[in-house]
Amino acid sequence: MSTLAESAVTVPVATPGGHYDILIGSGLLQRADSWAGLPRAAQAVIVSNPTVDALHGAALRAALAPHYAQLSQVNLPDGEVHKDWTTLNRIFDHLLAHGCDRKTVLFALGGGVVGDMTGFAAATYMRGVPFVQVPTTLLAQVDSSVGGKTAVNHPLGKNMIGAFYQPQRVVCDLDTLATLPQRELSAGLAEVIKYGPIADAAFLDWIDAELPALVARDPAALARAVQRSCEIKAEVVGQDERESGLRAILNFGHTFGHAIEAGLGYGQWLHGEAVGCGMVMAAELSVQLGLVRPEFVARIARIVAAAGLPVRGPALGTARYMELMRVDKKAEGGEIRFVVIEAPGRAAVRAAPDAVVARVLQQHCDPA
Ligand code: NAD
Ligand code: GLY
């Protein structure tokens, strides 16, 4: 990691699919060096949504205007419920209507929904055009903008249609987090919390101690959380870009969480809320499999609750949970596989007997 300037840091990401930097700091949207050295092109297209555009669109347009002769923008409808093929087509419609060529650079300005869809559009438009992630939610800054997973949802499963496609750069302007609703900040904290149990016990201790500061948006605490999260994610995706093994640990809590999101209907619970609650269930599963001590569940539940996230799953019913989890991308031959914790800071992917999973669901979800 090197210093970009006093108030900004650079975390490098090195994958077979591309080497790039994550820039983290305050005021990065306005700073000229955030945008220097990107692929040159006549055209650039900002992809955003009306909410983020109203707050941060003008700053990005002003920053990019000197670099591109033609700069246009397409706003997608806001929300997880719109992360689908129909909305994706709006990006392609815009690119084709504006005569965008293979060099056109796409800029994803928004949270994980905008980022994942822009990335997928960039991966597939003319078989691939460059794109830059400009994440504006905590969740997107600590997770979704890094590592090149791009996707849209299918009614039968979350993020089921997508591609691995790395951005040219990730620009995390911490100032954008000031406008984030508190519920969204909490959702982002779920993905911050996950890095502790899976990869860094000391970071889990730090999160535990600093949660009040994080919830209160203390700038130094948020900067540290974004930086350490990005360092861990860069390390993991650098070793396993396409999730042939290690990368799956980034899905701690997600098997249960994705079932909650799909089961309730996308957008009912935020992704981070479902993951927070899912981590409590995955911790319980780790206990039930004899891997960690029972106190670990209480600790994760306390941390998740302190972040402002739900700790009990909704009443989908055990059978429905199991059905939904069987379409998880980690499932093999119909067998559900979970990220479990072997010790704080160390994770593994394991299958678990249905009866044990059912017991976890019964203990940690509201009765149907
Ligand atoms: P989101 O993109 O829906 O953003 C949350 C809400 O905050 C939206 O209403 C958005 O308009 C608003 N918003 C964004 N920035 C704002 C700002 N600065 N101020 C005020 N409002 C702002 O949700 P998210 O939590 O950012 O992302 C969730 C998505 O990310 C899910 O679809 C999930 O599957 C995906 N994801 C992807 C990866 C990956 O590796 N690609 C990892 C984790 C999550
Ligand atoms: N968020 C999980 C991953 O990037 O692999």
Image: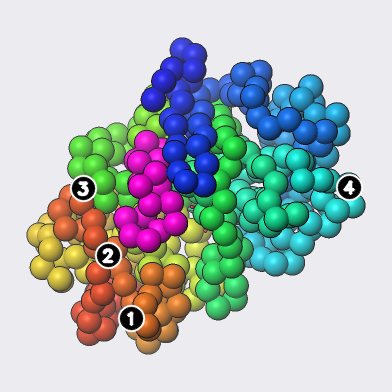
Label placed on residue 99: 4
Provide the residue designation for mark 1: 335
In primary-sequence order, the first of circles 3 and 4 is 4
What residue do we see at 38% from left, 70% from top?
Answer: 330
Q: Kindly identify the amino acid type of the residue bearing the numbered disc 1.
A: Glu
Provide the residue designation for mark 3: 345
Q: Nearer the viewer, mark 3 or mark 1?
A: 1
Provide the residue designation for mark 2: 349
Question: Where in the figure is residue 237, as x and y percent of width and height?
Answer: 40, 47
- Give the CA distance from mark 1 to mark 2: 12 Å
Q: Nearer the viewer, mark 3 or mark 4?
A: 4
Q: Main secondary structure of the magenta part?
A: helix
- Give the CA distance from mark 3 to mark 1: 26 Å
Q: Nearer the viewer, mark 4 or mark 1?
A: 4
Mark 4: which secondary structure? Answer: loop
The magenta region covers 230-248
In primary-sequence order, the first of circles 4 and 1 is 4
80 lies above or below 187: below
In primary-sequence order, the first of circles 3 and 1 is 1
What residue do we see at 67% from left, 42% from top?
Answer: 130
